[in-house]
């Protein structure tokens, strides 16, 4: 193998023709987008980026939460994600599409993956606590349980680095802050 060859073992992963990547602006989601932007042109895969506008039911029922402000925040977040996708995927020769859905992120991402015939779904995981996952659910866990396509769960570089440092230390030792 040529030392300048950067393919993953061989030219073109025959089984990956379409990748669905969930994007929400989080560090883990950004890392997933970066990896897909690197992988897709190497294997000739098409990319479908999914942004899900999730308005929690509690926001609709709580009198203290102003719905127009929440919607504006979602609009701003969607715009930021679109800009990031354009920066990472635009001009790389990748065939891609940006899909916006509203509802439960896990359900909507699975639906898009099924509709588009995705071979791979990429999602970020921000490593929430077990209590958070119990109460709110985990999109990554939902996808691994319900997706017909293979699922790749990405972590943010900061999370991976912190876990690596913590795991390399003797028990009872904390990293310097």
Image: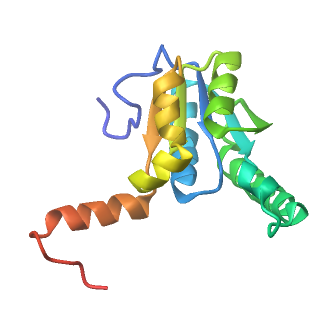
In the image, residue 146 lies at what x, y percent?
Answer: 52, 23
In this view, the residue in front, 38 or 149, is 149
In the image, residue 118 lies at what x, y percent?
Answer: 60, 20
- Give left or right: position of 4 versus 35: left
Seen from this angle, which residue lies furthest bottom? 177
Q: Is residue 149 visible?
A: yes
In the image, residue 6 lies at what x, y percent?
Answer: 40, 37
In this view, the residue in front, 84 or 128, is 128
- Give left or right: position of 141 versus 58: left
In the image, residue 54 lies at what x, y percent?
Answer: 73, 47
Q: Count of labels shown? A: 0
Image quadrant holding the C terminus, namely: bottom left
Image quadrant holding the N terminus, namely: top left
Looking at the picture, the colour scheme in use is: rainbow
The vertical placement of 2 against 158, above or below, is: above
Seen from this angle, which residue lies furthest left? 170
The vertical placement of 74 against 39, above or below, is: below
What residue sits 25% from the left and 61% below the top? 164
Seen from this angle, which residue lies furthest right? 68
| Figure quadrant of residue 108 | top right
| Figure quadrant of residue 3 | top left
The vertical placement of 85 against 122, above or below, is: below
What residue sits 46% from the left and 36% below the top? 141
| Figure quadrant of residue 47 | top right
What residue sits 53% from the left and 43% below the top? 137
Q: Is residue 125 visible?
A: no
């Amino acid at each position: 193998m040529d030392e300048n060859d950067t393919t993953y073992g061989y030219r073109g992963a025959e089984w990956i023709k379409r990748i669905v990547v969930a994007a929400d602006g989080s560090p883990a989601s950004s890392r997933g987008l970066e990896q897909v932007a690197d992988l897709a042109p190497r294997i000739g895969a098409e990319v479908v980026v999914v942004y899900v506008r999730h308005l929690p039911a509690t926001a609709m029922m709580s009198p203290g939460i102003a719905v127009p402000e929440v919607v504006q925040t979602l609009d701003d977040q969607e715009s930021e994600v679109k800009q990031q996708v354009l920066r990472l995927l635009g001009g790389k020769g990748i065939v891609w599409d940006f899909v916006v859905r509203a509802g439960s992120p896990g359900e909507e991402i699975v639906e898009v993956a099924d509709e588009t015939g995705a071979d791979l779904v990429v999602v970020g995981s921000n490593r929430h606590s077990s209590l958070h996952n119990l109460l709110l659910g985990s999109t990554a866990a939902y996808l691994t349980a319900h997706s017909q396509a293979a699922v790749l769960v990405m972590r943010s570089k900061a999370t991976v680095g912190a876990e690596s440092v913590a795991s390399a230390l003797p028990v009872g030792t904390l990293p310097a802050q």
